[in-house]
Every structure is written in C-alpha cells, then in structure tokens.
Image (tube, rainbow, N blue to C red):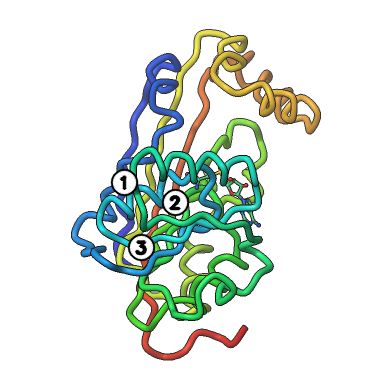
Amino acid sequence: MPDVIRVTRTLPWREAAKESFELRPMLLDQFRHEDLRRKHVLDVGTGEGRLAFVAANLGARVIGVDLDHMKLMHARSYAGVRDLRHAQFVWGDVEKDAYSTWSPVPFDLVVSNLCMSPAIVYRSAHALRPGGKMILCCHHADHWRETGRPSRWSFGEEGMGDLLEENALEPEFVGVDSVTVTFEALREVELYLRDRVVRKWVEDGRWEHLADAFARGERRLTEAYLVVKARRLAHPAPAE
Ligand SMILES: C[S@@+](CC[C@H](N)C(=O)[O-])C[C@H]1O[C@@H](n2cnc3c(N)ncnc32)[C@H](O)[C@@H]1O
C-alpha cells in the first residue's frame, strides 16, 4: 500500500457549498499522467456522465452505465451538445450485471465517482485487462462522522486496501480529501444539505445526533472522500 496522501481543509459552509457538487480535484489529478487516447473506459454509476466526459475529453472511448433512465438521458444529451461521439450511455446494474454485457473486450480503465461497493470492485477487477487500472472516488469512513453513523457505502483506507488485494488490484495512489465544513447554527446545515438528506437524517436519528453536537458547540460537518488508483495485476482476478 503506498503512503496515504491527505488533503484537509476547513471552510465556512457558504464557501464549501460552492464546490460541494464538483468532482474532487484529487480524483481529477489521477487522470493526469494517464494516456487515455483510444483507451476503452467504463464509468460505473455514471449518472449524468460527468466522469465519463472527463475521460472522453482525454480521447478515450467511454461507456457510462447507470440504473437511472433520466440521468442517462441527460448524459446522452450532453454528449450530443458537446459532440462527444465516443461516449455511450447504457442502462445496467453495476452490482448485478456481468460487465461483459457492455463490452466483450476487457477495459483499459474502470472509473467510478460516488458509486462503490465490494461487488463493484470485484466486477471491475474482472472486467479489466491485466495492467488495466481502476480510478475511484467514494465516501471515506469519516464522511459525516458528526452524525454518529458512517455512510453505508463508505470505506476506510484499510478496508479498501483489503478489498483491492482480494481482487488482484495493486494500489498506486491512495488519498483522503477532507473538508471540515463550519456553521454558526444548525439551520445553516439545512440550507447546506439537500432536503432529501435532512429528511432521511431526521427519520434515522442522525439529525438528533448532529443537533446534540451543535448544542455542545461542535458546529461542523466533515466531508471526506477516498480516492484510489489501482492496477490490475497480471494474475487473474477471481472468476465471476
Ligand atoms: C452519487 S451519483 C454519482 C453519479 C456520477 N458518478 C457523478 O459523479 O456525477 C451515484 C450514481 O450511481 C448510480 N447507481 C447506484 N447504484 C447503481 C447500480 N447498482 N447500477 C448502476 N448505477 C447505480 C445512481 O443511479 C447514481 O446516478
């Protein structure tokens, strides 16, 4: 496992809000030094294709897969508007479908932003050619830790390290990009987060946990992302 690179910042919530939907710079950095011209790339959980477009702009032929028809429709329209002919968007379940459904040829690169699970790592490893790479960004175990419960799909460095090893993926880069978002009052958290998140936290008790922390004067929320680049080893990944 390489040394873990940590980038930590503290931002008032209005500043943090300006960049909260942006792709993490640490993730985008992983695309530098990769020659993606004519490379065969899969973007799992592509959404509206943000990461797929990064790869397509670097010359890759990209397939973006998602379960959400509406997001796929937007991704196809953006591809049309930007005249990106080498980006294709297809419906599929990246946790259940065999990745050979979308391409009989192994991929050079599998990328993923905020769509991660052990099943995805397993399937990605199997779909990569030996020497092919996976670049991913997911929630880190510290994400929203002030709510008392880590996100279900978050990973710590060690857990992700084990998962990569089990799947014959050798990490080349491991980074944790965290922002401590600061607030003056709890109602600002409602403005900062989307309604859907607040409603869910009220229902599952996380909001109460956060309110207690605020009452103690701890008026912050950690947003933490784990960024990984890993290379598929020459020996075969476990059979699907
Ligand atoms: C947080 S969004 C991220 C979207 C995109 N990667 C981005 O950076 O904008 C997670 C996406 O994963 C998709 N997703 C979740 N589970 C999935 C699955 N099993 N198969 C395919 N897509 C899935 C969701 O529909 C959603 O578009």
**Label 1, on which residue?**
26
Secondary element at image label 3: strand
Mark 2 residue's CB less than 8 Å from ligand 1: yes
Residue at 21% x, 64% y is 35
**Label 2, on which residue?**
137
Residue at 38% x, 48% y is 176
User: Could you classify mark 2 by the number of other residues whose Cα lies within 10 Å: few (under 14), some (14-19), or many (20 or more)?
Assistant: many
Taking 150 as reference, is 115 above or below it? below
Sequence-wise, the earlier of marks 1 and 2 is 1
Q: Is label 1 in contact with label 3 (beta carbons under 8 Å)?
A: no
**Label 3, on which residue?**
61
How many numbered circles does the render carry? 3
Residue at 48% x, 63% y is 158
Secondary element at image label 1: helix
Q: Is label 1 in contact with label 2 (beta carbons under 8 Å)?
A: yes
Closer to the camera, 104 or 215? 104
How far across and how far down the image is residue 44, in percent?
52, 58
Q: Amino acid at mark 3?
A: Arg
Distance of label 1 from label 3 (alpha carbons): 23 Å
